[in-house]
Image (cartoon, rainbow, N blue to C red):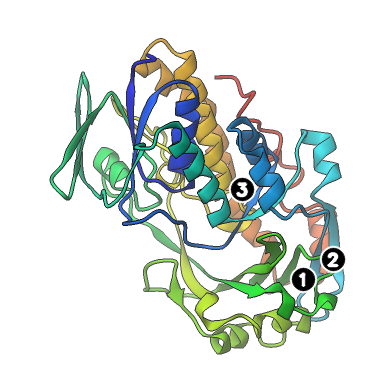
Amino acid sequence: MNRLKIGIVGAGIGGLSAALALQQKGFEVKCFEQAPKLGEIGAGISLSPSAAHAINYLGLRQTLLDMSYQPGDQCVRHYQDARPLSWTNRGQSLQEKYGERYYLIHRADLHDALVSAVLANDAEAIVLNARCQSISQNLRGATLQLTSGQTHHFDVLIGADGSRSAVRQALFGALEPQYTGYIAWRGLIPMELVPPEILQPPSGVFVGPGHLVNRYPVRRGTLLNFVAFAEREVWTEEGWSIRSSVDELLNEFEGWTSWVRGFMELVPPDQLFKWGLFDREPLKTWSQGRISLLGDAAHPVLPFLGHGAVLAIEDSVVLGRAFAAASSIDEALARYENARIERTSFVVHESRRAVKTFHALDVDSYHQRTQGKAADEGIGLFSYNPVTQVI
């Protein structure tokens, strides 16, 4: 097993986390990325205690300490007058219960740290301009053919190529996404432009009928990241980096408190994007023969619990542990799935439920409906630990 050569399709956060986890167990890994250069689009991501345990395990704790915003108390506020509806603690309270806390980080900062760690182990571990054309396998291994005409042979191949995964489609056929009726905007604002009086506390959520806004600092507090959700019956555009205008955003959130509109008005036009939210049913199995899936390729999840990147990072640590513990490839992939499918399916379904809590028409009853707890509390979301999970 320790001589296995493992290929990974995709060099996003999931693919690189998997590469690092496998490298640390002594496996030879090669990541294939279709982009011409390394980089991660997007903005802030949240890392719950389970992801923090995983990142510590991967040797990147200093990245969390140096590059993330570490929220304390977080407030859910009313969309019209910003009055508090619920308070929760994302720091010491979680630390005491789960041994870790919440971290909020720019996606690119985490991605850069993963790139550096993977390349430090093997300077040739990442191949760029490498788009998957097809995959095949036999009893001896799996073959990846690129659109360039190059072919690469591995003992095992992992598809970490996102929610529109070419590897998943090759294994299980087309899994058509279903539009959910929700759209989202994301933006980044220089923090020096934002009035401090509307950042109490800096990490906060605003709920309104059919709408939700979340905002928090990233980049050592130099940028304010926000994501805003709304309901819309029809959506035809593809991609999650579609340009939007500040006027369009403000029109959607007409009548909202100046605590929200105040920072929305400040977003630079080149830092404002929108996208439609699409959903897929979770797969019952991720593996066929010598090929398996990881992250959004296996279990795309709606963003209402902030666990998309979290699940991919968890997958990666469990995958590395499974291969280190197993005496065969079949055993390793079985251990990996057994430790992950129930967890990921649970988060997928809970994320669907969470939007109903946030978007309810009766905003004033938010505290009563949630019994004073955050949407991700009281459901066992944080009790999973990929470092200690039985495999």
Q: Position of residue 57 (x, y in %)?
A: 62, 30
Please report the residue visible at 71 percent of the width from the left and 34 percent of the height from the top. Answer: 383
Q: Quadrant of the C terminus?
A: top right
Q: Position of residue 21 (x, y in %)?
A: 50, 30
Task: State how far apart marks 2 and 1 are (Cα).
Answer: 9 Å
* 153 with respect to 355 (left or right): left
Evaluate if marks 2 and 1 touch, with contact meaning CB atoms under 8 Å apart. yes
Earlier residue among tags 3 and 1: 3
Viewer-proximal residue among 217 and 173: 217
Q: Residues within 10 Å of mark 2 (few under 14, many from 20)?
A: some
Earlier residue among tags 2 and 1: 2
Residue 245 visible, this orientation = yes
Task: State how far apart marks 3 and 2 are (Cα).
Answer: 21 Å
Q: Amino acid at mark 3?
A: Glu
Q: At numbered mark 2, what does the secondary structure look like: helix, strand or loop?
A: strand
Residue matched to label 3: 350
